[in-house]
Amino acid sequence: MFGFSLAELFLVLLAILIFIKPQDLPEIARFVGKAIYHGKKLYQKLKNSLTDLEKEFELDSLRHEVNQAIASEKLKHEDVEEEDSTIIVDMFGNEHRVNNIKEIRSDLDKEKIKKEVEEGNALNKSKAIQKNEDGGNS
């Protein structure tokens, strides 16, 4: 329950018997019992208070709205055609999908964007490989 084996528990009880007088054991046990009781009572009050706050601020409906927004964003990304999205590699080697990169870089035509993305991805992949070989120190 608390991560103690039977042998460890036995050693703790033996140490308590050695360092505490036997006539004081009932008083100490009563104190520990009261402390545990008050701790559980405080925990229940705190838990009830948090539940009441959650109901008061309608966190369930907020959580539901956030989940709906996340689901709708996922649907948007799934609906995007492959030619409209570009994969860009950051300096850590992580790949990110960017939609409508032509709108972001309207100054370049399709071929120049493709070339720039390929060069940037190659550079960032090599940086990531080098960073991993160096042990992540830079």
Image (cartoon, helix red, strand yellow):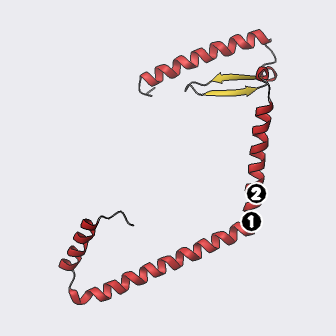
- Give me the disc on residue 57: 1
Q: What is the quadrant of residue 57 in the picture? A: bottom right
**Residue closest to the far front:** 6
- Point out the tag, 2 or 1, that comes first from the N-terminus: 1
Q: Is residue 74 left or right of residue 122?
A: right
Q: Position of residue 113 (x, y in %)?
A: 74, 14
- Give me the disc on residue 67: none
The relative height of residue 71 versus residue 81 in the rendered view (above or below) is: below
Looking at the picture, which amino acid does disc 1 mark?
Phe
**Label 2's element?**
helix
Q: Which residue is mark 2?
A: 62
At a point 24% along the width and 75% down the height, the residue shown is 13
For the residues bearing labels 2 and 1, Cβ distance under 8 angstroms: yes
Q: Is residue 78 left or right of residue 33?
A: right
Q: Position of residue 55 (x, y in %)?
A: 73, 68
Q: Is residue 108 left or right of residue 21?
A: right
Q: Is residue 89 left or right of residue 41?
A: right
* Number of disc labels: 2
**Label 1's element?**
loop
The relative height of residue 40 versus residue 61 in the rendered view (above or below) is: below
Image quarter (top left, top right, bottom left or bottom right) of the N terminus: bottom left
Q: Position of residue 96 (x, y in %)?
A: 66, 28
